[in-house]
Image: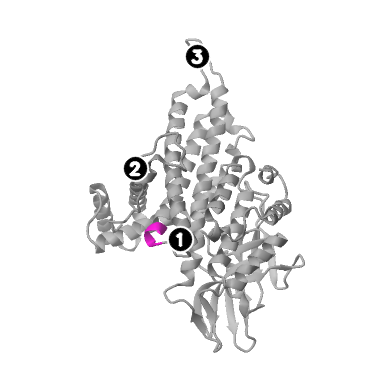
Amino acid sequence: MDEIASIRSDVPYVDGSLRLRALIKTGMLRLTDLTHNPDRFFLAHRLLARHATSLGPGFWIRFTVQYNLFAGTVLGLGGPEQVAVLDEMQEKGELGCFGLTEKLAGVNSGLVVNTTMTWHDDKQQFLLDSPTEGSHKNWISQGLTADKCVVMADLRVKGKSFGPHAFLIDFRRDGKLLPGITIGDMGRKTIGNDLDNAWIAFDKMWFPKSALLDRYCTIDANNEYTVKVKGIRTMDMIGQRLFTGRVAVAQAALTFGKSLFETTKEYSDSKKCWAPAGGEPVLTEIPQLTDLYGEAEHEFGRLDAYLKWCEGKLSDCLVADEIPPVWLQDAIAVAKVSAVEETIAMCFRLKQDVGSFALMGDTGFEQMDFLQCCKFAEGDSRILMQKMTRDRLKAWNKKGKSGTELEQKMCADLSEALAQGGKNAWVENYRAVYDLAKLLMQQQVSSVIPQLTVGADPYKPKAAATLKDPYAKSKL
């Protein structure tokens, strides 16, 4: 595709933003396709990820911020008039950013939002403010070039906090930042410098009532905070972007890994080596490389098939406008951690075994920090693993001692250690915490993809006819 082939990474971030503006205006992928055509949304992410070994992560991250975090949040939380803004932005080629993370709330801190959005009855407006330096938005991709922003802020009405809510605000008008917004560049990075990452501060800015994404909540005529749909929490819908993002990130990591292995094997297949018995063996025939290539093909295939299954189940929920059930949320977390961590491990091993080729520029190895981005994006791998173990132990202690023999033993040992270890027991037993999470992830993937023929198209897995929803009988 010409639109993708022309993308470059050795350009200033302004040029990167102009490329995305042009791509948006083509309409090839609509800003509304996440819910209308989710298969196209995920396919577009995979296509771009194939170029990450040569381009780095910059444009892929810019793309997913635009289509998933920004537009996806408007789609999930916005009313009809707010969603219609996306079509206007598409025609103009306008960019958005997603203002969630803050200086004192990184990937290991959970969802902490100290930016405030306070409703004022007398003005019938919201006041947006960053009360401290720690509440400044941090590492906001596309934050130096965006026209609009979905900003996450603690909603306060009549002196009461209602927690993080999403607001759609103008960020620039006629190309100029709105008064009250201060931004700064996060600085040069190891990779992805064609992407702008910003810190953002808001200084007592007034916004109309329509800024609140109001599909599920509003400020009523009596100036009271009102929930429109019972049983739907705003935070649940904000979390939707984590689910789609986790699938996209996991697929991107695997796509990167497969691409790196493909190009490296092309080199090692043609690299002749000396042998004591004569002949002209090639580098691929070195035992550790032969074994690694086979192992990677199998593992990437299994995880690709599992991700395709997750994508299909999640797409059904997106089209039906439903929150994914808990078992699918858990399955997607497993997909994200398993795919990213396995790809990191495989690519690192490849780097150690292929020799000086890994030191050369333009081989893809110099872009491996893309996987570092994947590790922390849409939920840090370690935090997700701790949640898996906490949830499993809670179920094990309250709902009966189920699971495999090994799983039961690990749950019993860890539960006893936590009960006897005091307030620091979780930290002191962190290895057991992660080991249990690894076991749970292995069991989850195996329950969905029991068999896969090596070399088969991972998006048409041989075992497709036998796939079933995990947890159908288990209480895990």
Nearer mark to the viewer, of 1 and 2: 1
For the residue pair 7 and 192, the one nearer the viewer reads as: 7
Question: How would you classify the magenta stretch by its main secondary structure?
Answer: helix
Q: Which residue is mark 3?
A: 275
The part of the image, by quadrant, that contains residue 263 is top right
Q: Which mark is residue 317?
A: 1
Q: Residue at x 52, y 84 (%)?
A: 159
Q: Earlier in the sequence, mark 3 or mark 1?
A: 3
Q: Earlier in the sequence, mark 1 or mark 2?
A: 1
Left or right: where 173 falls relative to 201: right
Q: Residue furthest top?
A: 277
> How many marks can you see?
3
Label 2 Cα crowd, 10 Å radius (few <14 / some 14-19 / many 20+): some
Q: Which residue is mark 2?
A: 450
Residue 465 screen position, x and y as percent = 37, 45
Label 1 Cα crowd, 10 Å radius (few <14 / some 14-19 / many 20+): some
Left or right: where 130 falls relative to 332: right
Q: Residue at x 55, y 31 (%)?
A: 264
The amino acid sitting under disc 1 is Cys
For the residue pair 127 and 75, the one nearer the viewer reads as: 75
The amino acid sitting under disc 2 is Pro
Residue stretch in magenta? 325-329
Secondary element at tag 2: loop
The amino acid sitting under disc 3 is Ala
Nearer mark to the viewer, of 3 and 2: 2
For the residue pair 475 and 163, the one nearer the viewer reads as: 475
